Amino acid sequence: MEIENEIGGTGGRVGVGDSKARGEKKGSHFIVATGKDYSGKGVQQSFVNYFVATRNRDKVTDADEDKGKKLLLRTQDQQKPKATKERDGVTAQVKQDDFVIEKEEDDLRKHRLEKEALQTFNLERYGGMMKHYINCGFNLLIYGVGSKWDFLNNFAKRYLGEHHRLVINGFHSATSMKSITNQMVTYAQKNNLKYAAVKKTTMSLNDQIENIKQVFRNISEPENGEAYKKNYVLLIHSLDIGALKNDEFQQQIAEIAEIPYVSLIVSVDHIKAGMMWSEQMIDRFNFMALQVNTFADYDVEQEYQSPLFSFKNDNQEVGLSFVLKSMTQTQRNILKLIAKYQLDNPQDKGIQMKELMNLCVENMLAFSQKAIKDYLHEAKDHKVIHERTDENGHQILFMTYNPVLLEKISNDELN
């Protein structure tokens, strides 16, 4: 028997005269070519690798057959196309999600760049015009689609740098008329003492406004003939939101807007904001209205808005107001010291009795810890003040109100 090709080649041809070569091995997959061409073509036999055993012996054992089957199955398995995640849809979905995310991020980036370009365009288009109107004595009312917070702040920095500016966030729940007039009185104390005797900020709101009007009236008509060149710019964001939209506050703001050398710039966001004022009020404000569409998000304004259905906070403020009105002025002043300390030192979670004692002595409110405890007895009964002892044995006094209420207590706005 002669095999012409190696195992794994194209085949082997066996001599016709070899009787053993004719026929086949029953019960196995090993078939020897007989040399006859039944199809009219030359017969070629392919040998699988495990048939190498036939070179050494005449028959293939069952073990060789099993080994060959395993090899054959392994080879076929390796040649099969692997079932990838794309075929079952997992990777395809992941790729689709990644594509959507990338597209959204790209759109957001484009929109952000477009908004920045629009803000630059608005500043270039309206900035010089707005400054001209202010120099002519008008007050500005800015309305339009989108938040005007960034636009007005950038305008004030770029075009009104030589003037003193007071920026008020009307959307802040703690904003009040007292917070505006206190700042204006402080400014007058620091800069205009030679023109008028300015009283302290503890006066009533109406007295403060009258005093401010007197100060600016004096500087507009100086005795030495030297005119006051700078304006006091009052910039109020979102005048139609929060406490400032109250009719009484609007009247007081109009009084301030009528003061010489005080320029008022306000923004409104509600589509019906113009219905807040009568014709008489509009004349008092002396507004020059400009539509500036920024299409900017109200991110800053939204941060300061109270959550919906915050009835608990409203009731808490009303109850606190009743308690404070029933107290003496000294008791309220001590509570103001505690509230102000907590706002200035939020990390301390309260004030030590020793520190409160020092503050009371400086402000001539109390001169002993016993007196302070007597003054705070009513506040403790109504749960306005709480007391605890720290790890060092120090007595700590604190309030559990949110920063907005603490600020109102420190500004004496709840009595």
Image (cartoon, grey):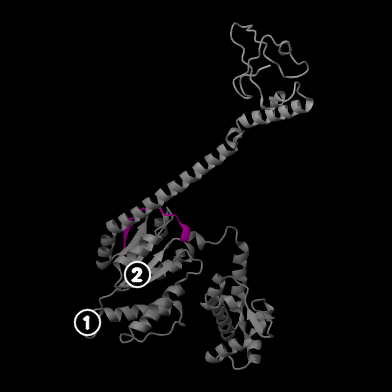
According to the picture, the residue beneath numbered tag 2 turns out to be 257
Q: Tell me residue 202's x, y (percent).
A: 47, 83
Q: Nearer the viewer, residue 1 or 330?
A: 1
According to the picture, the residue beneath numbered tag 1 turns out to be 226
Q: Tell me residue 192's x, y (percent).
A: 33, 83
Question: Quarter of the image containing the N terminus?
Answer: top right
Magenta segment:
286-300
Element under label 1? loop
User: The disc labelled 1 sits on which kind of residue?
Assistant: Glu
For the residues marked 2 and 1, what is the alpha-carbon distance in whole angstroms?
23 Å
Q: Tell me residue 415's x, y (percent).
A: 55, 76
Q: Is residue 88 visible?
A: yes
Residue at (39% x, 56% y) in the render: 274
Q: Nearer the viewer, residue 145 or 282?
A: 145
How many circles with numbers are drawn on the protein? 2
Tell me: 265 left or right of 12: left
Q: Are marks 2 and 1 in contact (CB under 8 Å)?
A: no
Q: Is residue 280 visible?
A: no
Element under label 2? helix
Q: Tell me residue 312's x, y (percent).
A: 63, 64
Residue at (28% x, 75% y) in the render: 230
